[in-house]
Amino acid sequence: MDEGSERKSGFYWHVHHGVLLEWCYSYEERKQYIIEHKPASEQELRLRLFQPVHGTLPDAVARASQEYVRASQEYARASQEYVRASQECDRAWEKRDRASQECDRASQECDRASQEYARASQECDRAWEKRDRAREKRDRAREEYDRALEEHAAEIEALHEQECPDCPWDGQTIFPEKGD
Ligand SMILES: [Zn+2]
């Protein structure tokens, strides 16, 4: 595929110093890496021995090697995917944790408000009953007063006559209907 381009992949001798034969994804990249990162004293030997395999490798070796390369790439992709999923999971957990704390606080707030309402409601009931009793007491006092007035009407009328001369009061009003 990369035939003729700078980046050649294929089987190479001595891609790394401790491995005889390896599939190299990019000759150019590995060469640059050696130049930039390997000790100067090693570079000449490394670059001289880092050469493509020209002959034909046993089929089993070539197939197994390419299978290994594919599996390694698949593993690398799966690892990245796992890291992303793991971070997403951590974020989701933190979010859930915050929401849970928020929920606990709201729940406690709800409990307190419910207790507060229950107290206010009892207070309201007591005040209603108290008012009710006070109204009954007032009504009885009014009856008592009316009865006393009625029972002592004669004495009160006598006292009135004595203290209020020339009074037009007729038992109902001080403005009795004029007789014309
Ligand atoms: Zn009078």
Image (tube, grey):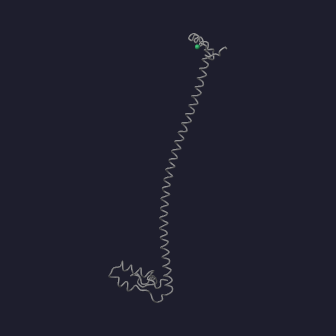
- On the image, the x and y values in percent for residue 144 come to 60, 21
Seen from the viewer's position, the closer of residues 144 and 26 is: 26
Identify which residue, 64 or 88, lies in the foreground.
88
Which residue ends up furthest to the front in the rendered image?
Answer: 180
174 is higher (above) or lower (below) than 26 = above
93, above or below 120, in the image = below
Q: Quadrant of residue 20?
A: bottom left
Location of residue 33 in the rendering, given as x and y in whole percent from the top left corner: 39, 78
Residue 76 drawn at (x, y percent):
47, 73
Query: In the image as oriented, which residue stretches furthest toward the left?
Result: 41
Q: Nearer the viewer, residue 148 or 168?
A: 168
Which residue does the image show at 52% across and 44% down from the upper left? 113
Residue extending farthest to the right is 180
Q: How many marks?
A: 0
* Quarter, ligand 1: top right
Residue 78 rendering spot, x and y as whole percentages: 50, 71
**In the rendered view, would you say 9 is above or below 99?**
below
The quadrant the C terminus occupies is top right
Rendering quarter of residue 8: bottom left
Q: Vertically, is 174 above or below 121? A: above
Q: Residue at the location (49% across, 81% down)? A: 66
